Image (spheres, rainbow, N blue to C red):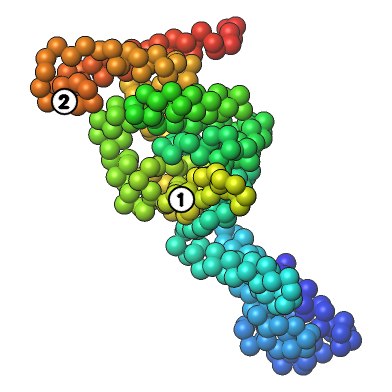
């Protein structure tokens, strides 16, 4: 039964119409048509929707949208419900509080963006939307983060987003997160401590945490294409992306520093200035982070210490001088990195196997 049928019943009650013939005369249509509309078997034309709205002292837009919703296929009904909600708020919004006006404007903006299968959020709304996306995840989340310092204690995503991650894990959502570090970062004791703390916080929350070195993973052609595809889609230079349930992708378009505090010396906080959410199938296929986790030569489990990997990398001797690449001559650097990261990966897999609970056959 269509929702518009309830308005037909309201017309009958308001004007004390006891039959479909009387209803048909009131609406200016034939009796069979009135019967079908009353039973929800036919959707009224726009002119009739306006007539019904006038008889009930309602806004015609409401009935026109209801008629469109009743005609829409099942997968599109949610969008028409959203449109009805926006219209309802817009028609009843008071002059104060003024934030409602901004909320209505935001809803209208989202409705216009939905057609392109993408939503863009800015400022505080971008950070808040990241939390909301995690709250509705049902099965899995795969995330790749180069700007990982926003997870530090005292930064924008701590603890709100971390708590949302923890709640998702309790709902049996599988979360994998890859932090991409640079050798310059981990050579600094402060940065290294921050990275270890971030990964330990994630692991305690039940997240599968992995890491890779940018200098190593950038050598892989697959990752190079992955990063290039993100740049073409408008992502920031440092990729922060998360795929929810293999259906919705969220990635950062830009970052910024915001001073926190008005008394004394302000503390700089890293914020996501602009974030995009998309469910476009073409972008989902190209930008899916899941294949990056399969690059086991470069992607290491947290169970293998970051410090040990860095020390082993930096202690590799260079047999000859020449063209330098990160402290090593280019050809030798490539060979040593392959050997080194393969070793790290195998040790990581062995450590994971040792810590995996025993399951009797």
Residue 9 visible in the picture: yes
The answer to whether 278 appears left or right of 129 in the picture is: left
Number of numbered discs present?
2
- Where on the picture, by quarter, is residue 106? bottom right
355 above or below 36? above
Quadrant position of the N terminus in the picture: bottom right
Q: Relative to the observer, which residue lies in front, 136 or 351?
A: 351
Q: Is residue 194 above or below residue 75?
A: above
Question: In the image, 356: left or right of 326?
Answer: right
Q: Position of residue 278 (x, y in %)?
A: 47, 53
Q: Earlier in the sequence, mark 2 or mark 1?
A: 1
Residue, disc 1: 256
Identified at 37% across, 23% down, the residue is 187
12 displayed left or right of 138: right
Q: Quadrant of the C terminus?
A: top right
- Under circle 1, the secondary element is strand
Hey, which quadrant is residue 331 in on the image?
top left
Is residue 133 in view?
Answer: no
Residue 56 badge: none
x, y percent for residue 241: 45, 42
Q: Is residue 114 above or below residue 273?
A: below
**Residue at 41% across, 17% down:** 307
Residue 67: x percent and y percent? 64, 75
Quarter-of-image position of residue 54: bottom right
The percent coordinates of residue 338 (x first, y second) are 26, 18
Q: Which residue is situated farthest in the front direction here?
A: 264
Q: Secondary structure at mark 2?
A: strand
The image's mark for residue 324 is 2
**Is residue 352 found left or right of 201 in the rendered image?**
left
Residue 92 higher or lower than 117, as above or below = below
Q: Please report the residue visible at 77 percent of the width from the left and 77 percent of the height from the top.
A: 7
Q: Residue at x 28, y 12 (%)?
A: 315
């Amino acid at each position: 039964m269509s929702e518009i049928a309830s308005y037909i019943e309201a017309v009958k009650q308001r004007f004390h119409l006891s039959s479909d013939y009387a209803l048909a005369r009131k609406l200016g249509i034939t009796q069979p048509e009135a019967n079908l509309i009353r039973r929800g078997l036919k959707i009224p034309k726009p002119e009739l929707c306006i007539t019904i709205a006038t008889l009930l002292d309602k806004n015609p837009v409401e009935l026109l949208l209801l008629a469109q919703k009743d005609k829409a296929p099942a997968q599109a009904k949610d969008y028409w419900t959203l449109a009805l909600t926006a219209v309802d708020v817009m028609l009843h919004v008071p002059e104060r509080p003024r934030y409602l006006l901004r909320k209505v404007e935001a809803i209208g903006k989202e409705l216009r963006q939905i057609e392109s299968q993408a939503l863009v959020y800015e400022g505080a709304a971008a950070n808040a939307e990241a939390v909301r996306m995690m709250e509705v995840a049902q099965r899995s989340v795969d995330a790749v983060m180069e700007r990982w310092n926003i997870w530090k204690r005292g930064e924008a995503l701590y603890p709100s987003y971390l708590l949302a991650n923890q709640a998702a894990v309790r709902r049996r959502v599988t979360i994998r997160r890859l932090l991409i570090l640079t050798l310059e970062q981990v050579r600094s004791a402060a940065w290294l401590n921050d990275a270890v703390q971030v990964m330990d916080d994630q692991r305690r929350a039940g997240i599968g945490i992995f890491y890779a070195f940018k200098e190593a993973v950038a050598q892989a052609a697959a990752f190079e294409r992955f990063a290039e595809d993100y740049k073409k889609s408008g992502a920031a230079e440092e990729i922060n992306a998360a795929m929810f349930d293999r259906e919705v992708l969220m990635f950062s378009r830009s970052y910024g520093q915001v001073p926190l505090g008005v008394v004394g010396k302000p503390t700089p906080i890293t914020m996501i200035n602009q974030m995009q959410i998309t469910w476009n199938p073409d972008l989902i296929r190209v930008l899916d982070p899941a294949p990056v986790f399969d690059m086991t030569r470069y992607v290491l489990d947290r169970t293998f210490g970051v410090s040990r990997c860095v020390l082993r990398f930096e202690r590799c001797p260079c047999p000859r001088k020449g063209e330098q690449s990160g402290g090593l001559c280019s050809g030798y650097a490539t060979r040593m990195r392959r050997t080194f990261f393969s070793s790290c990966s195998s040790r990581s897999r062995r450590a994971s196997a040792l810590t995996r609970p025993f399951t009797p056959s």
